[in-house]
Amino acid sequence: MTTSGSSRLTGDSCTPNSIHYVYDTYALAQGTAKALIKEKLDSWYFLTADYAFGQALEADTSAIVKANGGTVLGALRYPMDTADHSSFLLQAQASKAKVVAIAGSGTVFINAVKSAKEFGLTDGGKQTIAGLLVWINDIDAMGLPLAQGLVLTNGFYWDRDDETRAFAKRFYERLKRMPNMGDAGDYSSTMHYLSAVKATGTDEAKTVMAKMRETPVNDFFAKNGRLREDGRFVHDMYLYEVKKPSESKYPWDYYKLRAVIPADEAFRPLSESKCPLVKK
């Protein structure tokens, strides 16, 4: 699983043959929530997509906000297909929370950011919009004038180093856009699986899973990435800030790195896991 997000997939819903590869709601919260709390943005209000992913993202982020001395002033859940966020945003604005956190993604997230700007939530630094799952495609759709200053957590950025840029060049030649973390995770996880099949000479699940667990991943996506017994693929995550238009020098030059989140900090520790496969 590369673009599914709920941390329950390696928690109480784990299975012997499933792998959660790119990110999860815990990792997203660990990066973005902790970073904003450090900046004294310690009161939060959630606009949450009303399905499993949105609910898990709100729960994981709320826990980290509270654990780091912050408060949650409220939350509203909106249907996935909502086009008009006006009533939700007015309630978030009235809460006077320092952070309005959007626990959703895609078109709904883009529309919510646009509406927040129109309602003046961020004017003069009144409130900060936090995107808890932001894809580089979203930034491209919004444009830097609207997206600038957003803080986000990500598992991959095409312009991080020479290896990511080489992969991105090959990807762009075929699809005419830069890869997001899901695209990169698809390729990396598929190659890790195929390498294990080749090494073991079989596609029998138990044998291949054992080989994948014992073999670290060192490619353009992850350095010393490893697969745990709960199915979580553990690797470094990255905290980025969206550049101002004046800082962007070429197409898709959207992010500046704020921090590297080491693998052991980014993902929920096994000691806290609810996965029945984990021996404690």
Image (spheres, rainbow, N blue to C red):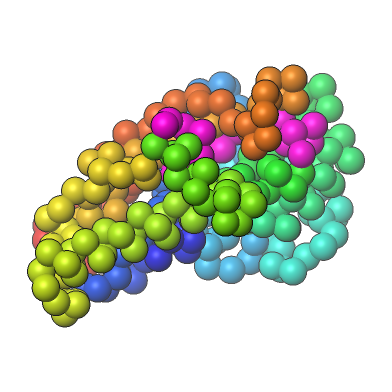
x and y, in percent, of residue 192 in the image: 26, 59
- What quarter of the picture does the C terminus occupy? bottom left
Q: Residue furthest bottom?
A: 204
Which residue sits at x=80%, y=48%? 89
Image quarter hosting the N terminus: bottom left
In the image, residue 11 lies at what x, y percent? 32, 63
Q: Position of residue 254 (x, y in %)?
A: 63, 33
Q: Residue at x 74, y 69 (%)?
A: 81
Q: Examine the rendered structure and indicate whether residue 165 appears above or below residue 5.
A: above
Left or right: residue 127 compared with residue 219: right
Give the residue displayed 57% in from the left and 51% down from the top. Answer: 173
- The answer, for residue 76, to whether it is visible in the render is no
| Residue occupying the point 74% across, 20% down | 246
Q: Please tell me whether residue 165 belongs to the stretch shown in magenta.
A: no
Residue 138 x/y as whole percent:
68, 48
Return the residue nearer the eye: 222 or 267: 222
Please provide the residue range marked out in magenta: 143-162
Q: Out of 5 and 35, give the one closest to the viewer.
A: 5
